[in-house]
Image (tube, grey):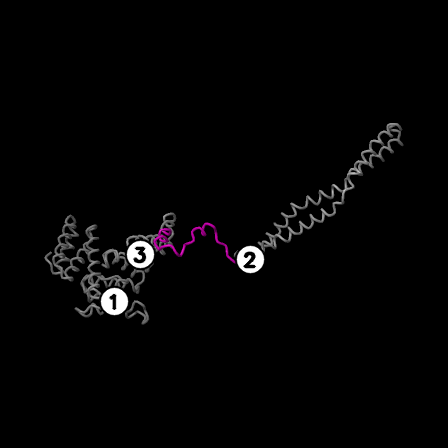
């Protein structure tokens, strides 16, 4: 309300600044006419004659000249009075002072937004359009983070969106930045481990397992970390350990926990040999991420097998690019064996030995793992 009052005063001041000189000039011209001046001059001549300052003849000549000018001025002032012009100016001033603000308000109320809060121009230009594709919005956020790399909240918001788009490597980088600039929490560590596993085709790699262990150290009963640590145990062939981890998790879980059915299905998978839960891979095969597992429940056996084979091939492709992951090679070999494809298992075994041939420690770990799988180390 104070702002409106200030605007009203400014408008009134501007109108008066324009119209006031017109009124003052009219009054000054009316009060100082030529006839008054000439009459004063005639009176002054009489005073000069009485004082003996000028002679009679000079006085008469001066009176004649001034009288002539007085008559001419009197003829010019016989025009109609200027009272009507004064009234017109006053009417115009009143209309400007009152009419213009009233007209402005009458137009603004139906067309404007008087109750709209402040919205800075810079933010208005960046306001997101609901019709824009998600990729375009993500690109804007990424551009913002390039200019503000320490914005932990921005990285935290961006990371899960990148994960949903399947950009797992970028999501992992976003979670790492969120941890670096916003501090580590159990949720952030567990989320980072999840996208690392997703990038590996659902395999809980050593790096992902380290993140889940870190999350569990920060929060012992973190459900995501516990689930994936059990999944890592299952993928290593340690079903008893996986069952123990998941039973402990279920014992502390609320009955209405949304992730409880997933844990129960996983526990059934490792507790009943040869009877995997619907939508779950066979023991030893690469596990599906949470979202893929939910989708696989409604798939046919053929479609489910196609999905699992695709995940295994993605793991194989990743290992060809980075062959230092001994645990990943062992999981790939075991996956091919579970799928009944021994030729590919032997091929993966040869590729693994070639990849770590120059690293004695990794080669030792690989041979020990192969012996546990029943292969010649």
Which sits earlier in the primary sequence, circle 1 or circle 3?
A: 3
Q: Secondary structure at mark 1?
A: loop
For the residue pair 45 and 66, the one nearer the viewer reads as 66
Mark 1 or 3: in front is 1
Q: Quadrant of residue 31?
A: top right
Pointer 3: what residue? 165
Is residue 132 highlighted in magenta? Answer: yes
Mark 2 or 3: in front is 2
Q: Quadrant of residue 200?
A: bottom left
Toward the left, the furthest residue is 376
Decide: marks 2, 3 in contact (CB < 8 A)?
no
Check disc 1: other Cα within 10 Å, few if <14, some if 14-19, many if 20+: few
> Where is residue 104 drawn, in percent x and y?
58, 53
Q: Say above or below: 200 vs 89.
A: below
Mark 1 or 2: in front is 2
Q: Say above or below: 204 vs 53.
A: below
Pointer 2: what residue? 109
Pointer 1: what residue? 298
> Where is residue 341 drawn, in percent x and y?
13, 59
Which sits earlier in the primary sequence, circle 2 or circle 3?
A: 2
Q: Indicate which disc residue 14 carries.
A: none
Q: Say above or below: 277 vs 313.
A: below
Quarter the C terminus occupies? bottom left
For the residue pair 272 and 62, the one nearer the viewer reads as 62
Would residue 127 be found to the left or right of residue 204 on screen? right
């Amino acid at each position: 309300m104070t702002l409106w009052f200030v605007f009203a005063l400014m408008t009134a001041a501007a109108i008066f600044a324009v119209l006031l000189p017109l009124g003052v000039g009219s009054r000054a011209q009316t009060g100082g006419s030529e006839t008054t001046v000439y009459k004063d001059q005639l009176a002054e001549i009489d005073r000069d004659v009485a004082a003996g300052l000028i002679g009679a003849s000079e006085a008469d000549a001066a009176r004649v000249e001034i009288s002539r000018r007085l008559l001419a001025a009197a003829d010019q002032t016989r025009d109609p009075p200027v009272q009507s012009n004064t009234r017109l100016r006053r009417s115009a001033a009143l209309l400007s002072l009152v009419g213009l603000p009233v007209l402005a308000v009458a137009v603004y109320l139906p067309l404007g937004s008087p109750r709209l809060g402040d919205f800075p121009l810079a933010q208005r230009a960046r306001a997101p359009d609901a019709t824009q594709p998600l990729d375009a919005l993500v690109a804007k956020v990424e551009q913002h983070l390039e200019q503000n790399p320490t914005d932990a909240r921005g990285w935290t918001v961006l990371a899960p969106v990148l994960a949903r788009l399947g950009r797992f490597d970028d999501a992992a980088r976003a979670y790492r930045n969120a941890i670096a600039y916003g501090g580590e929490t159990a949720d952030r560590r567990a989320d980072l481990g999840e996208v690392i596993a997703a990038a590996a085709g659902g395999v809980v790699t050593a790096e992902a397992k380290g993140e889940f262990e870190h999350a569990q150290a920060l929060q012992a009963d973190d459900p995501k970390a516990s689930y994936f640590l059990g999944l890592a145990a299952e993928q290593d062939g340690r079903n008893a350990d996986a069952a123990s981890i998941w039973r402990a998790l279920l014992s502390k879980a609320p009955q209405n926990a949304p992730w409880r059915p997933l844990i129960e299905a996983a526990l059934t998978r490792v507790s009943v040999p040869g009877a995997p839960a619907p939508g779950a891979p066979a023991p030893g095969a690469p596990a599906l991420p949470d979202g893929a597992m939910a989708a696989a429940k409604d798939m046919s056996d053929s479609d489910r097998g196609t999905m699992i084979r695709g995940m295994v091939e993605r793991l194989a492709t990743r290992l060809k690019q980075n062959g230092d992951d001994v645990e990943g090679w062992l999981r790939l070999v075991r996956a091919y064996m579970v799928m009944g494809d021994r030729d590919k298992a032997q091929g993966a075994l040869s590729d693994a030995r070639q990849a770590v041939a120059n690293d004695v420690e990794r080669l030792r770990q690989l041979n020990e793992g192969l012996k546990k799988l029943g292969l010649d180390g």
